[in-house]
Image (cartoon, rainbow, N blue to C red):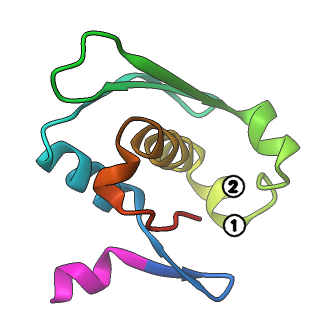
Amino acid sequence: PMTALKSIDVIQGQPALRAHAMRAIVQRQGHDIELVESDDTHCIMRGRRKGAENWQSVTWDIPRVQRMGLLGKDQWKKQPKTMLVARATGELCRLIASDALHGLPYA
């Protein structure tokens, strides 16, 4: 129960699954996720559904974060690399295995 509670944040009044929990669910279903490249300015991840040959790639970078108005937030200032990985993870998990997540929100 405590692990489940630690996997959900309330963001702007909405419960949302954390990126690491999404990754765990997707990998437990047998899908592949890889961190290709990551630093404080960008993150590239790729993933594929179980049994698939083709990989899907997702890239998050600081210009994209700025366009979304996120760069001024506290966590983006403190740990941009971690936040980029989290955003890329969430997008990739929803892209390759939305059925495994059952439509759980991510913020």
Q: Residues within 10 Å of mark 2 (few under 14, many from 20)?
A: few
According to the picture, the residue beneath numbered tag 1 turns out to be: 74
Against 39, residue 55 (above or below) is above
Horizontal and vertical percent position of residue 4: 23, 80
How many C-alpha atoms fall within 10 Å of the one at disc 1: few (<14), some, or many (≥20)?
few
Residue nearest the viewer, comparing 102 with 18: 102
Queried whether the magenta region covers residue 94, the answer comes back as: no
Which residue shows up at 40% across the image and 43% down it?
93
Element on which disc 2 rests: helix
Which quadrant of the rendered structure holds the N terminus? bottom left
Contact between marks 2 and 1 (CB within 8 A): the answer is yes
Height in image: 71 above or below 54? below
Q: Where residue 54 sits: x, y (%)?
A: 34, 11
Q: Which mark is residue 77?
A: 2
Magenta extent? 1-8
Image location (x, y in percent) of residue 55 = 36, 15
- What residue occupies the far top of the structure in this picture? 53
Above or below, comparing residue 85 to residue 43 in the picture? below
Residue at 39 percent across and 78 percent down: it is 8
